[in-house]
Amino acid sequence: MEPLASRVTMMVTEGNHEIEPQGHGGAVTFASYLARFAVPSEESGSNTKFFYSFNAGGIHFIMLGAYVDYNRTGAQYSWLEKDLQKVDRRATPWVVASWHTPWYNSYSSHYQEFECMRQEMEGLLYQHGVDIVFSGHVHAYERMNRVFNYTLDPCGPVYITIGDGGNIEEIDIDHADDPGKCPSPGDNQPEFGGVCHLNFTSGPAKGKFCWERQPEWSAFRESSFGHGILEVVNSTYALWTWHRNQDAYGEHSVGDQIYIVREPDKCLLQPRGVISQDWTVPRRDALLQH
């Protein structure tokens, strides 16, 4: 990484491989992560490198920590709420959030692993109209339809799992909806936080822990190593392109590509306060296939 990191500005967030328990019975964690990377935590009102924000190219980026306290009574949630309230959509019309562990994931690997974090924080992101969420952890690619609380919602964020950059642990292939591949509720224990595995309460998977086909909120998934590029065209359009690593760049080498469209007049920001799990409002954003 050094040749690239020495020339290109990189903003990072911690994952499970950065925990690295050391010394005193493993009491020291994240030592390398905290020492090696410089991030604008103080500038964004955070007192830690585990969560912070910054502006770039018309986007307000929010970097969250899945391996530190994310409960509504904690420091991270309080900071996130204040940070979202300060976003100036005239200067940064797009809001993009990122953390390591995906909330929406139809692969067997890490299925519903960080459901507790979703239940704590999803309402706040929805309330403030976050546009896109990037996560990793699952070693495959998956793009979701706009979703909130496991229900298709035209004003929910577009969640994208881009954990397929390459690793020594191989690619994730099995889907939770494949025959015999649904994890048991006791599987996929998180390395931090509680266990909040749940059965679905509505839709085709009502009463079940896994769908029996690709979930309706999962738009596209592929078990290939790859990488993505987000191009903000203007305050309304952003182009997301995913490339397989083995493909040469060319006219027909795109693995997945969409225009993500903001329609803030139809998706107004919601009143402040905690949103209940089942509260949705008639707003409308668009997601166009390219």
Image (tube, rainbow, N blue to C red):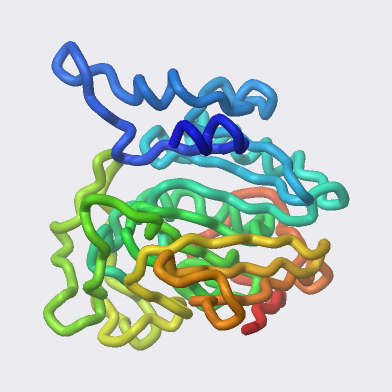
* Residue 115 against residue 60 in the figure, above or below: below
| Drawn side of residue 72 relative to residue 24, left or right | right
Q: How many marks?
A: 0
Q: Nearer the viewer, residue 214 or 1?
A: 1
> Is residue 142 in view from this perspective?
no
Quarter of the image where the N terminus is located: top left
Q: Position of residue 153 (x, y in %)?
A: 58, 75
* Residue 194 against residue 235 in the figure, above or below: above
Picture quadrant of residue 112? bottom left
Picture quadrant of residue 185? bottom left
* Residue 22 against residue 198 in the figure, above or below: above
* Residue 82 against residue 242 in the figure, above or below: above
| Residue in view at x 63 percent, y 53 percent | 96
Quarter of the image where the C terminus is located: bottom right
Q: Position of residue 207 (x, y in %)?
A: 26, 79
| Drawn side of residue 165 relative to residue 283, left or right | left
| Drawn side of residue 121 relative to residue 283, left or right | left
Name of the residue lying farthest toward the right: 90
Q: Nearer the viewer, residue 253 or 59?
A: 253
| Residue in view at x 40 percent, y 42 percent | 66
| Residue in view at x 55 percent, y 57 percent | 133
Q: Position of residue 202 (x, y in %)?
A: 38, 80
| Drawn side of residue 205 relative to residue 57, left or right | left
> Is residue 24 in view from this perspective?
yes
Q: Nearer the viewer, residue 278 or 28?
A: 28
Q: Position of residue 210 (x, y in %)?
A: 25, 76
